[in-house]
Image (tube, rainbow, N blue to C red):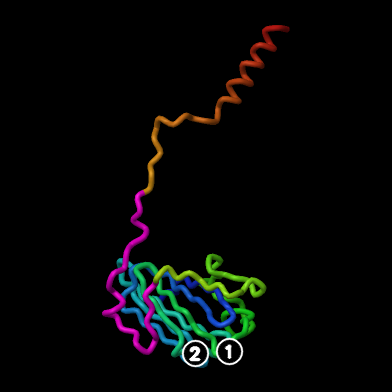
Amino acid sequence: MSRYPEVKWAQRLDKVYITVQLPDAKDVKVNLEPDGIFTFSATAGTGNNTYELKMDLYDKVDKDASKINIGVRSIFVVVAKAEKQWWKKLLRGDGKAPHYLKVDWDKWVDEDDDGPGDLDLGGMDFSNFNNMGGDAMDDDFEDSDDEEQSEKTEDSPKIGNDKAEASSEVKTEAAAST
């Protein structure tokens, strides 16, 4: 039985960004058809669970201009649209979006705000779908989640009960004066 990975998406006038969030994915297979059929499969997790999905994108795409980056924590796909136009949604049809599909607000730009600026891809190494190979994708990935975080010390002052102690002192003084 296969599972669905979490998928985030955002768009620009000429492209769609699709991020499949699946840490430590193995045997990744991504296929994009010109008519907008996007398929994905991989295994991940301690039990080598199978993850699969098939999405019927809103409109036709340019497969040759589309790019993919298979990273340690996610698979990032830049899907080039066949026609430069804003899509009303990611998938065809009138039904509700699947539960695993979410908007990527970090990459989202409103139609009114889309200008000459482009998304900073942070130097990701992309390869075309036609040249997708597993050997070239596995080199030189750094794990950005390993940054050291500062720890809080126990010597820091405690905040919180000063008001409660002060109000009880006022009550004690008021009771003593009556």
Circle 1 SS class: loop
Sequence-first disc among 1 and 2: 2
Q: In the image shown, does 169 or 113 lie closer to the viewer?
A: 113
Residue 171 image label: none
* Cα–Cα span, label 1 and label 2: 9 Å
Q: Position of residue 3 (x, y in %)?
A: 42, 74
For the C terminus, give its image quadrant.
top right
Place residue 29 in its image quadrant: bottom left
Q: What's the residue type where badge 1 is placed?
A: Glu
Based on the picture, tell me whether residue 154 belongs to the magenta stretch. Answer: no
Q: Which of the labelled discs sits on residue 83, or is there none? A: 1
Kindly indicate whether the residue at mark 2 contacts the one at mark 1 (C-beta within 8 angstroms). no
* Residue indicated by mark 2: 62
Please, is residue 12 above or below residue 148 in the view?
A: below
- Considering every residue shown, the one lying at the far bottom of the view is 35
Q: Is residue 76 left or right of residue 105?
A: left
| Residue occupying image coordinates x 44% and y 31% | 156
